[in-house]
Image (tube, rainbow, N blue to C red):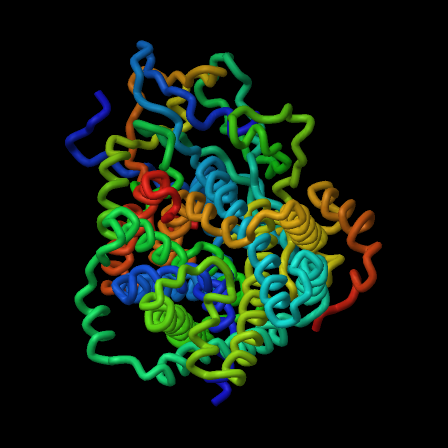
Amino acid sequence: MKRLLGVALGILTAIGGFVDIGDLVTNAVVGSRFGLSLVWVVLVGVVGIILFANMSGRVAAVSGRATFEVIRERLGPRAGLANLAASFLINLMTVTAEIGGVALALQLASSVYYLLWIPVAAVAVWLVIWRVRFSIMENVTGLLGLTLVIFAVAVFLLKPDWGSLAGQVLAPSVPQQETAWSYSYYAIALFGAAMTPYEVFFFSSGAVEEKWGVKDLAQSRINVLVGFPLGGLLSISIAICAALVLLPAGISVTSLSQVILPVAEGAGKLGLAFVLVGIVAATFGAALETTLSSGYTLAQFFGWSWGKFRRPAEAARFHLSMIVCLLVGIAVLATGVDPVLVTEYSVVFSAIALPLTYLPILIVANDPQYMHEHVNGRVVNVLGMVYLVIILVASIAAIPLMIVTGAGS
Amino acid sequence: MTSASAPLPKAPRAGGRILDAQLHLMDRQVLDHDGVPVTTVDDLEVSGPALDVNIEPGSPAPVLTALLTGSVLGTRIFGGRPPSSRLIRIPWKDVAEVGVVVKLGVKGEPLDASWVERWVRDKIIARIPGGRHDPR
Amino acid sequence: MILGDLLGTPVLDADGGRLGRVADVRFVLAGTPHQLMAEPRLLGLIVGPHSAASFLGYERNGLTRPHLIARFLRWRHRGSFLVLWEDVAQVGARSVRLRPGFTRYSAALENGEQA
């Protein structure tokens, strides 16, 4: 039972990866434009992130080294720095977007203009990082974020035609009003969203924060096997809701209010309350995850002392860098830029960061100097190589597709 | 000229543990005696040989004298390195163990290599309320 | 001397012919014992066809997985060899020159010797 409760890390990681503000909107957009024809991409992404998060969790548990340290040591200074630059920019853009997302969610709930919520959100994020214990942080945000399961509940309450839904999932095709280019672009965007590098940075650093050791390998596996499929489920539910309500009505998704419309329709006022709590919690959790990831990646690359388990005075540069990130986020949002738009462009940097992140993990997970007898098995290696190829293809195709489709418009 | 079709002979037994600079030491994390991260190994200081000088046959091999840190970001991207006087030394005698990470036998706090951390701590973090609060 | 300056320097034989670049520098912990660890003495240079990417060390450490990556990297660094300190004639800023009649040794690390 204790094992089952100890899955908060996996759940929080998955929340930041699958239902952050960018994904909330993208999944609804996908559902409202493509129906269920892209669900298979989410499934492929879930398997991929399970694979790599498990490997990086194992490396962290057995050797005590979190993922970005491994990246720096394996790739060397130049390629490692390229990855750091790309990953850091993704993190920074996502932090900015999430702070904006928390503000937007609070605006939705309170009708107070979102720009006023931005400093509140940023300070709240900082306070939690500064003072709240890691385990408390992950348990509370993880649990509250799970209220997004109301999307799945709403699917049932909307009484869909299950047969036609299954048909769309299993026999995907490009809808009439869309092109193969935009279909491919969104496929890559969804795949990249499922496998965003900050998920493995956060998960492996969290493993070190929780001081997982060899005896916790089973725990790590349960976290991965519970958290990410849940994240994928939430993701898919949002898309299904949009497909059931927005697509037939031709409603296009431009803001959070369209995203939650199906829940209001299916589950009424109570559902609306749940979804608002869920969205605030999920964006807040994602803000925590990405801010911490910014700190983790910088500190691990440069060899600084890091960790929430240390006094801030003992991890000074780690905390300073996160404060700076939050300040930059506030500054960018104050210019009035749309937070969701910011995440769409982080797809570009993901293209660089994805292969440079996953190759070192795959290699180190096979290295007995790090892993002793816990090196990868045969099946995991084969799957790992297959996914490496998929990741490479996705990362090469991302930018051209983005240009051709104008970021999916 | 370089491709040997027959397998190369094994080197004579060295009489001790082998460490390859790039493979085992460069870019590794340095932890202090208590496991607290100090820095990364940016470069290594070797006692010789003198440059552009013919080496007498039978002269003793150089030894590795110190770990170096303090490479500036710009030089890491574009190549080159800061002058030796600007790099910070961690003498080899302080190194306790080399494995996945390099562990020192001394505390990291008083080392030159920790000066930036100390500065940030004293000037910034310690000034924010709660900075010294133990999170456990 | 700073080791980073040596890595990547072209290696020439006694007649000036190009053999490769310094891919790595091998030390052995057999020098003066200090309090904690013995002093590392320079054993030799690993000469390889390129100096890049040999950080992964696949051509030396006997790791065979993942298969495709291991095979690709071994192929890329085929022709790497170890040359002992005794065979080094001169270390310069722009090249390293070896003595005539130097011996090429295998660069492989034995299991017991691996760090």
Horizontal side of A76 relative to C52 (left or right) equals: right
* Residue A240 visible at all: yes
Of all residues shown, which one is farthest toward the left?
Answer: B5
**Residue A51 location (% of width, % of height):** 34, 64
Q: Residue at image x 43%, y 65%?
A: A18
**Between B55 and A12, which is closer to the camera in this rendering?**
A12
Q: Residue at image x 38%, y 85%?
A: A157
Of all residues shown, which one is farthest toward the front?
Answer: A249
Say which quarter of the image contains residue A129: bottom right
Q: Residue at image x 43%, y 36%?
A: C26
Q: Is residue A377 above or below residue B49?
A: below
Say which quarter of the image contains residue A224: bottom left
**Residue A266 location (% of width, % of height):** 42, 81
Of all residues shown, which one is farthest toward the top?
Answer: C15
* Residue A224 visible at all: no
Q: Residue at image x 22%, y 69%?
A: A168
Horizontal side of A31 relative to A213 (left or right) equals: left
**Between A210 and C63, which is closer to the camera in this rendering?**
A210
Horizontal side of A63 relative to B111 (left or right) equals: left
Say which quarter of the image contains residue C12: top left
**Between A139 and A349, which is closer to the camera in this rendering?**
A349
**Residue A44 location (% of width, % of height):** 29, 63
**Residue A355 location (% of width, % of height):** 36, 47
Please tell me how many numbered marks the rendered image carries: 0
Q: Is residue A381 above or below residue A7?
A: above
